[in-house]
Amino acid sequence: MSITLHLTRDSVAAGDDLDAPHRSTLLVPDDQITEALVAAIHASGYLPRIADGVATWSVVSDRPLAVIAQQWPEPRMVSDLPHPPEQLRREAGGYRFHVNYHVQQDPETVLEVLRRLEPFAR
């Protein structure tokens, strides 16, 4: 069985605004943990590649979950605590995710800021 991830993302440039909010869906096995769902988003090719190879994104589903950096091989979760998929925002039998674009901000800094917010997101 599979589950649907309902995705939206920020635009990366003025010309990219034409298709905003860049809705997409991704089918994944339904026995996945949240970390695997974020990894599937990262591996799917949904996020545009930035020409200079430096881009920072944050993945949210009612709360910040992870940071994806174009220059990192894999996403990094905001919290070391488990995020059961049951805590994610549900939509149409699947889960809703939004991916924020943080331009070329240092992904370590974005991750640090989101980790400081984590206790307040519960």
Image: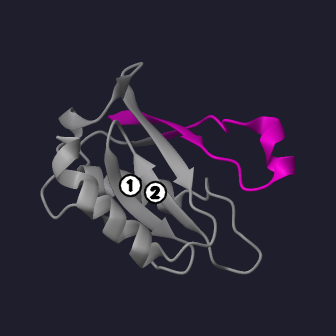
Tell me the quadrant of the picture where the C terminus can be found. top left
Residue at x 23% of width, y 43% of height? 121
Horizontal side of 57 relative to 47 (left or right) equals left
The kind of secondary structure element at disc 2 is strand
Residue, disc 1:
38
In the image, is residue 36 part of the stretch drawn in magenta?
Answer: no
In the image, is residue 6 part of the stretch drawn in magenta?
Answer: yes
Q: CA distance from mark 2 to mark 1?
A: 10 Å
Q: Earlier in the sequence, mark 2 or mark 1?
A: 1
Residue at x 41% of width, y 74% of height? 109
Percent position of residue 97, x then y: 44, 40
Tell me the quadrant of the picture where the N terminus can be found. top left
What residue range appears in magenta? Answer: 1-26
Percent position of residue 43, x then y: 51, 62
The kind of secondary structure element at disc 1 is helix
Residue with the most extreme right position: 15
Mark 1 Cα within 10 Å, few/some/many (few <14, many 20+)?
many
Residue, disc 2:
58
Judge whether 8 appears above or below 105 on screen: above
Residue type marked 1: Val
Quadrant in the picture for residue 47: bottom right
Nearer to us in this view, 56 or 72: 56
Percent position of residue 37, x then y: 35, 51
Q: Are marks 2 and 1 in contact (CB under 8 Å)?
A: no
